Image (cartoon, helix red, strand yellow):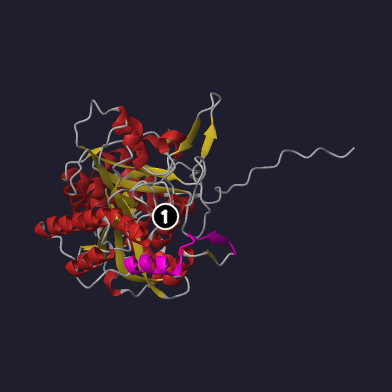
Amino acid sequence: MAKDKGARRPRAEAPKGFRDYFGAEVTERAEMLRAITEVYHRYGFDPLETSAVETVEALGKYLPDVDRPNAGVFAWQEEDGDWLALRYDLTAPLARVAAQYRNDLAMPYRRYAMGPVWRNEKPGPGRFRQFYQCDADTVGAGSVAADAEICAMLADALEAVGIPRGDYLVRVNNRKVLNGVMEVAGVLDPADPEKFAEERGIVMRAIDKLDRLGEDGVRALLGKGRMDESGDFTDGAGLSGDQADIVMGFMAAKRGYGAATVARLHDLTSGSDTGRAGVEDLETIAALLDAQGYAADRVEIDPSVVRGLGYYTGPVFEAELTFEILDEKGRKRQFGSVAGGGRYDDLVKRFTGQAVPATGVSIGVDRLLAALREKGRIGGRVAGPVVVTVMDRDRMADYQAMAGALRRAGIRAEVYLGNPKNFGNQLKYADKRQSPVAVIQGSDEHARGVVVLKDLVLGAKIAESATLEEWKDRPAQVEVPGDDLVGAVRRMLAE
């Protein structure tokens, strides 16, 4: 008889579209989020944590490129028939919280939140199904002063994490303006808002892809459709040439300064009350920001910003990094968007039936981290812990006491807990941990009341170049009194 095969071993790899984060990446993310949340806190926002799981009904049909409740999200059906899903952003859960606790929260409610979100989309290079967001929102404020404040706070947050002024731009538009343009183009009927809804959705998503597809790609999506490099065909909005010209004119409405852009938008929305109201909102936002010192070099009006999510109802904004990087083919290009948001006055209303205005912004944490690495703000050597090596197995308590003394002094330290038989392996471990210092005390050093400190950073430098002038007067290994362990390690770390 054939021998039964055992169960197949699982593959040791993350699912497609997901990734693992290790020490330095997690540390860098935590430090960046701390800088951002300090800005949010300074503006008077409070933290909020919500469940990673929501009902599909609560999440709603707002993801771009989907037309089914459970498409685009990771969803499953419970035994009682309810559909649940992993949250696809941090805004939809906020709307549920604002409705659920509306009698307990001080309105306007100002909150910030951070954490992973999940989207069941086709993964690709740099495009993951799980990623981090960091949001700030104001619920219950109908004035566009709240939108202006979000834009100012976003600019401050970017500067706080190390993106200097001149390397970013917060771009602002208004969905009302776009609706006015669509009304003029004949794809929005104020008397029947549901009419042409599918076409408008395609138009908005097409405009949102301008930086990726270019004018020709967007125009194709406004018309019959577009085939991408993989051969996949995306249906277009079916607009006529004249209708497409109006939309493309809107996207090209940006002028050299804000007032000229606003004037052009007034012309494009002529005959639409909604469009006129949207342009007036933009004028107010620009005036409020200018009064606070946020000029066009930090925040500007840009009609090409529409945002892909379907729940925005008014001002929308994106933070774009303007410095150049090299792509995978060595070509220069701008880094692009790292944050976006806008006003969503109807999201809470879905739960309460009452109008509750809201506005907010979401920072793409992974994108911003990648930008900081490009700028050289992070990504250098991240020091590991001081490693206390083990020379005598029966003196483990002494080694633990050394590590404890270092920790009480605020120095990160650990005792080597592997097999201590091969001392060379202990130093290899310390190198792999990127440890700056190794502490060594054998029986001879113990009898004399001293410890040996090995400068692993200096040792690595000497290994690179034995003639390196800046290191020649510093010994890579020193012997110090045992009672000076903490002070000596401090001095070595400082050097």
- In the rendered structure, which amino acid carries the disc numbered 1? Arg
Residue that appears at 48% across and 67% down: 220
Q: How many marks?
A: 1
Can residue 451 be seen at all in this image of the molecule? yes
382 or 82: nearer the viewer: 82
Q: Position of residue 137 (x, y in %)?
A: 26, 43
Residue that appears at 43% across and 43% down: 88
Mark 1 residue element: helix
Is residue 233 highlighted in magenta?
yes
Q: How many other residues sit within 10 Å of disc 1, few (<14), some (14-19) or many (≥20)?
A: some
Q: Position of residue 460 (x, y in %)?
A: 38, 64
Residue that appears at 37% across and 34% down: 397
Residue, far right = 1
Write down the quadrant of residue 211 in the picture. bottom left
In the displayed structure, would residue 3 be above or below residue 282? above
Can residue 391 be seen at all in this image of the molecule? no
88 or 414: nearer the viewer: 88
196 or 201: nearer the viewer: 196
